[in-house]
Amino acid sequence: MDCQITHVSACQCDGDAIVVAIFADGVLEGAAAEVNEATGGVLSQLYETQELKGSHGELTTILAPAGVQARQIVVVGLGDRETLQRGCVFKAAGAAARRLAEKPRRSVAFYFEAEIAADFCADGVAGAIVGCVGQDLYRADKTRHPFESIFWCGGTEDDVRAGQIMGDSVNLTRRLVNEPASEIYPISFATACETLASETGLEIEVWDQKRLEQERCGALLGVSQGSAQPPRLVILKHQGGKKEDAPLALVGKGVTFDSGGLSLKPSDGMKAMKCDMAGAATVVGAMHAIALEKVPVNVIGLVGLVENMVSGASYKLGDVLTARNGKTIEVLNTDAEGRLVLADVLDVAIEQGADRIVDLATLTGACLVALGTDVAGLMTNNQGWCEQIADAAQNVGEAAWQLPMFREYGEQIKSQVADIKNIGEGRWGGAITAAKFLEEFVGETAWVHMDIAGPAFSEKPKAWVDAGGSGAFVRTLVEVAKKS
């Protein structure tokens, strides 16, 4: 969609709708004060009667307002003025856009206070783009209608462009996750990456099954052998820094459908398993933004793509797989497959010369038990690197929390017949034992594992984003790259 800066006053803007942001302190400034005066003090009256509180994300619609050319006003709350952060603006703009996108709109203009509009322009534009796009990919009667144009009052052209890139990148991830597994499978995902590379200037390398066999990717191949869909490994490269600089590696789990294999999931547990490639989709969305924003750092994105299916060729409980780095793995649960895929991809990332790695995966239900559906788990072998990731997530308003990696958890994945096994001992601490498994494949390289099983996919909508794929942590990864 078209995104532009507008300097037209809120009262004179003739778009289909305008969005006016207010704080919870009741002080009306800038566009809010202008609209209040033009409408005969409507906003002040709503404040006085407590119909309008300005709490974060609160939405109030005023139809056919007198004194304003736009056909309706949506007033969105920003909460406390003193605690306003980038994530607040992203979500507030997204919530207003999502409300307005219930019907087709030609154009919508967003008016925040001048300083806020300038400082948080990219976040607001990105939120508006994300908010007006739904998960209704195959509905004849759409529930969300992306705007033809968005106008943002304040900021610069570069800010608006950055916001548009970010919003489009988050929506790219969401689209990949929301597509059914009949449309997104290893080959089609790799093809989408090739298209992305041609459009953004990213370098790309795709390993097919023959190459994966030559590269000794036994863990990834073990997972894929039960499916009629052959696996792929995609390597995307952004050369934004000096040639000699070691790259940052973003690694994503790309299980395009997870039946659980012979450790078969029940139907309810399988319904949303098209989302088990959200880690890979998040990496792709981040690489899209990093390339278009020309971030001055070397970044490689690596995604391992498989289906975990059931057939006579499926890998079995008790099988021993040999990973690319030579470690042998006893398989005691074929539904603990994502860590097997990541094991080989992490080794490739190290071979590519990465000196810092972040991997993202919808890896464990145990992480949801520990942290709920809105928070990602962080696990690491390098505290300083983990703090950089956590700070980046906090800066953009995405929730992540560190879990411990005590040595004792590693004892649980020792096997009697192989070097390690792919599950721990019992249910407890499953997110951490999975991370301890991954740690076996990164050596001394600074590494953070992000378990995004909760926030990557939502059964119910949020105020600022539709249900389904959320695009969570695309913005965090881009922030990490920018701060590297």
Image (cartoon, grey):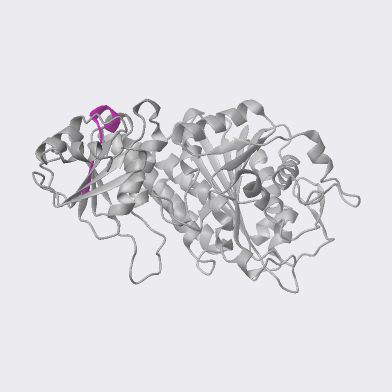
Q: Quadrant of residue 311?
A: bottom right
Residue 79 pos. (x, y %): 36, 34
Please indicate, yes or no, whether residue 3 appears anywhere in the rendered image. yes
How far across and how far down the image is residue 58, in percent? 33, 44
**Residue found at x 74% / y 53%:** 216
Residue for point 56% across, 62% down? 272
Q: Is residue 111 visible?
A: no
Determine the residue located farthest toward the front in the rendered image: 49
Give the farthest residue toward the bottom: 312
**Which residue occupies the extreme left position in the image?**
67
Residue 111, magenta (yes or no): yes
Judging depth in this view, the residue of 166 and 142 nearest the camera is 142
Whole-percent x, y for residue 312 in the image? 75, 74
Q: Residue at x 63, y 32 (%)?
A: 355
Tell me: residue 324, above or below residue 5: below
Q: Is residue 227 left or right of residue 192?
A: right
| 99 in the magenta segment | no
**Residue closest to the eye, 274 or 220:** 274
**Magenta region:** 108-117
Q: Quadrant of residue 405?
A: top right
Which residue is most to the right?
A: 416
Q: How many marks?
A: 0
